[in-house]
Amino acid sequence: SLTTHPWLADHAAGGTTLVPGAALTDLLIRAGDETGTSLLTELVIEAPLLIPTDGSVQIRVTVSEPDATGQRTAQVHSRPQDAAPGT
């Protein structure tokens, strides 16, 4: 939320606050640290992560098992803080 992370307000486009790519990179590097993966080779952002003016967002990072080459994929998902369970 902008309340707990006010620096996010510096990253706005068209009046909408976005989570910067650097913050997503930090999340993925931390997930890699937790899973023994030391290298982030590519970051593809399919849609911007929007931060509401009021309220907050829950973020979930998932990391796959290693493939035959030892590489893993990771995904970042989000939902509004007040979303119903399972959505």
Image (tube, rainbow, N blue to C red):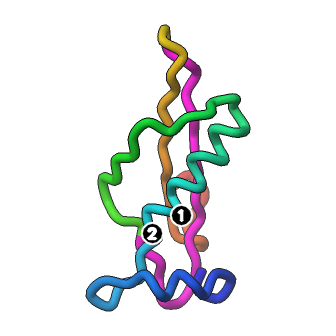
The amino acid at mark 1 is Ala
Per the rendered image, the range of residues in magenta is: 50-67
Of 33 and 84, the residue lying toward us: 33
Label 2 packing within 10 angstroms: few (<14), some (14-19), many (20+):
some
Locate residue 36: give its quadrant.
Answer: top right
44 vs 85, left or right, is left
Image: 38 above or below 60: above
The outermost residue toward the left is 14
Image: 83 above or below 14: above
| Residue 62 is inside the magenta segment | yes
Mark number displayed over residue 20: 2
Of 56 and 27, the residue lying toward us: 27
| Residue 30 is inside the magenta segment | no
Q: Position of residue 30 (x, y in %)?
A: 66, 47
Locate residue 48: give its quadrant.
Answer: bottom left
35 vs 21, left or right, is right
Q: Position of residue 26 (x, y in %)?
A: 58, 56
Instruction: Please report contact status of discs 2 and 1: CB closer than 8 Å, yes or no.
Output: yes
Q: Secondary structure at mark 2?
A: loop
Q: Position of residue 14 (x, y in %)?
A: 26, 87
Give the residue at x 49% y 50%.
76
Separation (CA) of disc 2 from disc 1? 5 Å
Give the residue at x 49% y 8%.
68
- The residue identified by callout 1 is 23
The amino acid at mark 2 is Pro
Give the residue at x 59% y 73%.
82
Give the residue at x 55% y 67%.
83
